Image: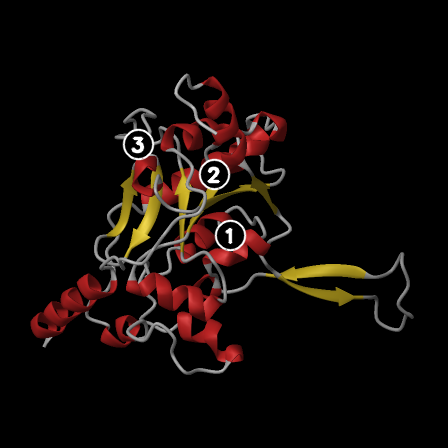
Amino acid sequence: MNGPLRRVGHWLAAYLTRPLFNYEPYAPVPAARLQTLLEPGDVLLVEGNTRVSAAIKYLTQSTWSHAALYIGDALGHGLDPETAPTLMEADLNQGVIAVPLATYARFNTRVCRPVGLTAEDRGRVVAYTASRLGDAYDLKNLIDLARYLLPTPPVPSFLRRRLLALGSGDPTRAICSTLIAQAFQSVRYPILPRVETLCPEGQQPCAYSVREVLHIRHHSLFTPRDFDLSPYFRIIKPVEASGFDYRALVWDDQYRAENTELSPHATA
């Protein structure tokens, strides 16, 4: 049955990744500008425009449906934002692949940078992700794919994250944040750990005796929005990094007024 199941899986994957035509980005960042902002180990969140993206955004109650890791020139193909494969991601159709920044030049995006991550561990995160290049998604697991057929599945809010974790345990999943979570967990860098407060047995809790212990969440439970919510990742805004000056903006009424005054054929 593997052959028929795999063919159905390919059909489902193609259907789910088909773009929707009502997507309109509000603030896309050109690929060349993104390239100047990003550092290896940064997470790029993307607001996708496919059927599976719509389901993920609903289930996570978030703008972000996709995540990719910026690896710079780790694959040895340069840094050209239009052609160089500098982003690692898990794709429903193709498995773990590397794509250029230009892939998401027309999407709303957000850059999340791990705070205080050492250069050595940053390199390990990049190397771990790059080593997974070519891993394939298990298209035989139809339950894993069918969970995205309904853009707004009728499930209670407390079950939505669990629904995203369904599947066979294959190395890649439709939600590529799983791959990135594994990369950061390989160097014990926190994303959204469960925090437990402990104090020595027999003592009353007090400031000097209480200790916080972090518990690693299973990588299958992570979603793209977790990198946005995490206190351990800093949001990098393109306008902030480029020295934004609101006084230099040209608004439509100012533009019309200036062009009316300058035009020799202007009439009242």
Q: Which percent across, then down, holds residue 16?
A: 24, 65
State the residue position of label 1.
Answer: 185
* Residue at 41%, 58% in the rendered image: 65
Q: Taking 94 as reference, is 128 left or right?
A: right
Q: Is residue 263 visible?
A: yes
Q: Taking 265 as reference, is 60 left or right?
A: right
Where disc 3 sits, the SS reads loop
* Residue at 46%, 41% in the rendered image: 125
Q: Is residue 121 above or below residue 48?
A: above
Tag 1 or tag 2, which sits nearer the N-term? 2
Give amino acid for label 3: Leu
Q: Is residue 120 above or below residue 43?
A: above
Mark drawn on residue 80: none
Q: How many marks?
A: 3
- Quarter of the image containing the N terminus? bottom left
* Residue at 29%, 35% in the rendered image: 85
Q: Nearer the viewer, residue 255 or 5?
A: 255
State the residue position of label 2.
Answer: 41
Q: Nearer the viewer, residue 128 or 15?
A: 15
Tag 3 or tag 2, which sits nearer the N-term? 2
State the residue position of label 3.
Answer: 75
